[in-house]
Image (cartoon, grey):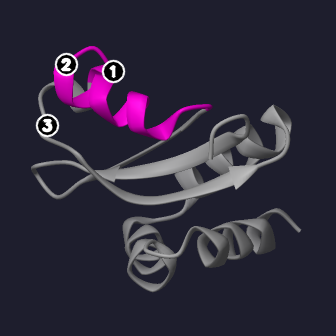
Amino acid sequence: MEGLYSVYMVRCSDGSLYTGYTVDVARRVASHNAGTGARYTRSRRPVSLAAEAAFPTRHEAMRAEALIKRLDRAEKLALTRLYGVDPDRFRAAVAALIA
């Protein structure tokens, strides 16, 4: 999904979820696993990609990230369980939160 802004969720080794946005999901997940990503994930490695969704603008991706971060754990887990393996469905579910 290069060239677009993506929102992603990673599952940490302790079972927690971390949400962020980037233009290169694979590179960002690799940086989390290298310990150079977010401070939150440094002590919770390794992480694995749980879900991702591409958006055409940075603003939309950042808005989606903020909305996901406001969800409780059960809602985040439901998002990843129901839509995480399908980026288009995950994007649609996240877009519904924005609307």
Name the residue tied to disc 1.
37
**Kind of residue sitting beneath label 2:** Gly
In the displayed structure, 83 sits above or below 22; it is below
SS for dot 3? loop
Secondary-structure class at tag 1: loop
For label 2, the residue is 35
Is label 2 or label 3 in front?
Answer: 2
Q: Which mark is residue 17?
A: none
Of mark 3 and mark 1, the one earlier in the sequence is 1
Pointers 3 and 1 in contact (C-beta within 8 Å): no
Task: Check disc 3 and give the amino acid type.
Answer: Arg
Q: Which residues are magenta?
A: 23-39
Residue closer to the observer: 82 or 1: 1
Residue farthest to the top?
36
Q: Secondary structure at mark 2?
A: loop
Q: Residue drawn 79% across and 33% down?
A: 58
Where residue 91 sits, quadrant-wise, is bottom right
> Where residue 21 appears, x then y in whole percent?
58, 37
Ranked by sequence position, the earlier of labels 2 and 3 is 2
- The answer to if 70 sits in the magenta stretch is no
Q: Residue furthest front?
A: 2
Residue 33 is one of the magenta-drawn residues = yes
Task: Give the side of residue 54 with respect to residue 33, left or right.
Answer: right
**Residue holding disc 3:** 44
Q: Is residue 26 above or below residue 15?
A: above
CA–CA distance between discs 2 and 3? 9 Å
